[in-house]
Image (cartoon, helix red, strand yellow):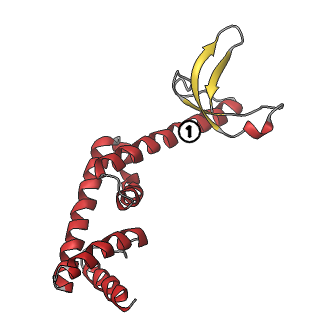
């Protein structure tokens, strides 16, 4: 326990020089495991902690750069939150590239859901959507189901359109 507290304090001190905010608990935990291994190999605490903090700083920069390349310019403000999500995935064992792809996919889904919700609100108020909302493979939110109300408000994917009924078939 005493050694763990020493490791955590060493990491906090090293990270405070590089990061304006304290590192999240999952990042600290992952770095603590690596620092403990370095100490077991006989490395000195301060230089090993500093090296790990610098490596994590470079990883965060790389993650940010990858996100900026894969997201539209209009989403640049989302990068700090997405970095946190990607960092958690990386600490859980995902490769940074894989974690960034997952975070970008999730961001696109959420953006589509938000766009569809806003378009539905405009349509309900007599407005007109800026562009077609429904498309094959698009995302939608289930509403108005009376026989199975537990399905209402669930997200779904549009799989095909039944022309005769004027309805989309979906997969929830």
Total numbered circles: 1
Residue drawn 40% across the image and 45% down it:
102
Quadrant position of the N terminus in the picture: bottom left
Residue toward you, 34 or 168: 34
* Residue 163, above or below 4: above
Q: How far across and down, in percent of the image, does residue 60 sit?
A: 28, 61
Q: Position of residue 58 (x, y in %)?
A: 21, 62
Side of 84 where 146 appears, left or right: right
Q: Is residue 144 above or below residue 163?
A: below
Q: Is 57 situated left or right of 88 in this image?
A: left
Which residue is found at the position 36% from the left and 50% from the top? 99
Element on which disc 1 rests: helix
Residue sitting at x 36%, y 62% = 91
Residue 80's place in the image compared with 72, above or below, is: below
Horizontal arrangement in the rendering, residue 37 relative to residue 5 (left or right): left
Quadrant of the rendering where the C terminus is positioned: top right
**Vertical side of 132 occupied by 164: above or below:** above
Which residue of the protein is positioned furthest toward the bottom in this rendering? Answer: 2
Task: Residue 85: name its quadrant.
Answer: bottom left
Q: Residue furthest front?
A: 40
Residue 73 lies, in percent from the top left, at 33, 43
x then y, percent, for residue 43: 16, 82
Please give the name of the residue rendered at 58% of the width and 17% of the height, measured from the top-left corner. 160
Q: Residues within 10 Å of mark 1 (few under 14, many from 20)?
A: some
Query: Which residue of the protein is positioned furthest toward the right in this rendering?
Result: 147
Front one among 114 and 172: 172
Residue located beneath label 1 in the image: 113
């Amino acid at each position: 326990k005493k050694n763990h507290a020493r490791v955590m304090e060493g990491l906090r001190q090293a990270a405070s020089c590089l990061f304006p905010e304290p590192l999240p608990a999952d990042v600290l935990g992952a770095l603590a495991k690596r620092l403990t291994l370095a100490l077991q190999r006989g490395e000195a605490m301060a230089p090993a902690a500093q090296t790990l903090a610098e490596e994590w700083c470079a990883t965060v920069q790389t993650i940010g750069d990858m996100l900026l390349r894969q997201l539209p310019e209009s989403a640049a403000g989302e990068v700090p939150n997405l970095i946190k999500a990607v960092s958690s995935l990386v600490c859980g064992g995902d490769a940074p590239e894989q974690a960034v792809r997952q975070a970008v996919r999730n961001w696109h889904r959420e953006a589509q859901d938000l766009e569809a919700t806003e378009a539905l609100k405009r349509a309900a108020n007599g407005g007109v959507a800026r562009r077609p909302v429904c498309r094959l493979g698009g995302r939608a939110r289930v509403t108005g189901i009376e026989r199975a109300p537990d399905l209402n408000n669930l997200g779904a994917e549009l799989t095909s359109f039944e022309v005769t009924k004027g309805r989309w078939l979906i997969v929830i």
